[in-house]
Amino acid sequence: MIRIITLVENTATKAKQRAEHGLSMFIERDGERVLFDTGQTDAVVHNAKLLGVELSGIDKVILSHGHYDHGGGLKHIADFSKFTVFAHPEIFRKRYSKLSDDGNLRYIGIEDRSFYEDLGVEFSLSEKPQEVIGGVYTSGFENMTTDFEEVDRNFVYEKDGEFLKDDVPDDMSVVIDTKDGVFVLFGCAHRGIINIMRDVEKKFGKKVVGFAGGTHLGPASKIQKERTIEALKRMDLKVMAPSHCTGLMMTSKLFCEFGSRVIFNNVGSVVEID
Ligand SMILES: [Fe+2]
Ligand SMILES: [Fe+2]
């Protein structure tokens, strides 16, 4: 049995839970545990306690990409646990968004590698898939092949004093092996959920049976939204548990299209898979 518990998400539905723009999901499989992303603040620690998830002693964390709303909780968990971060080597890019209230670039990256190492965090960085616990892998670098998905145009990163377009090459997902196929967890899916699922099917040689997590469909273009829904109709997934950058409008749209196969995935939501 695999249990996925959402610890941090943009929406909370019960008393005392904290909601924030960010994502964190806890994965438990046959007694092994791994945290996927950490949200933006110490909300991950607060909500884990409320939800009865023991984070002390957690020794493996997968980071989907180097954005503050996924990596911000790392330093708070480092206060009481020693862990290895499994991620892509480009997570430390100095990255910015063009979308801000004051018209200036807004910093959206995480801290330097040395900052975390000083806290005792270790890193296992690879652009290839890594098996983190039994049957749970990072996706590795996600190839983009569709003609309707693109990385958010508002992202740039700084290199040698120059600002370059950030295609978020470090975006990685989690691939969970199940008896019927693979289940995919997205962080923000910056490289497109259909791209990612096709890439995973090719690399892992198994059909995707469902997904959970951020799809980045909220800010996507109308055409990307429509064509993603068309592609999803052809995939016949059993479970879709979108959250975070999907937004309530797009999640509702998916619910209208796919009915009870869609789960509103907020703080405290639990997805169980055989
Ligand atoms: Fe995000
Ligand atoms: Fe992101």
Image (cartoon, rainbow, N blue to C red):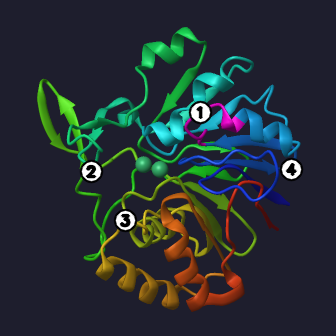
Residue to which mark 1 is pinned: 41
Residue lying furthest top: 118
Q: Are marks 4 and 2 in contact (CB under 8 Å)?
A: no
In the image: residue 254, left or right of residue 150: right
In the image: residue 181, left or right of residue 98: right
Number of the label disc, if any, that sits on residue 219: 3
Give the residues in magenta: 37-44
Residue to which mark 2 is pinned: 167
Say which of marks 3 and 2 sits in front: 3
- Spatial separation of the CA atoms under disc 4 and disc 1: 29 Å
Percent position of residue 78, x then y: 65, 20
Q: Are marks 1 and 3 in contact (CB under 8 Å)?
A: no
Say which of marks 4 and 1 sits in front: 1
Label 3, residues with CA under 10 Å away: few <14, some 14-19, many ≥20 = some
Q: Label 3 is placed on what type of residue? A: Pro
Q: Residue at x 52, y 14 (%)?
A: 117
Q: Residue at x 17, y 29 (%)?
A: 159
Secondary element at image label 3:
loop
Number of the label disc, if any, that sits on residue 49: none
Q: Are marks 2 and 1 in contact (CB under 8 Å)?
A: no
* Residue 269, placed above or below residue 101: below
Number of the label disc, if any, that sits on residue 30: 4
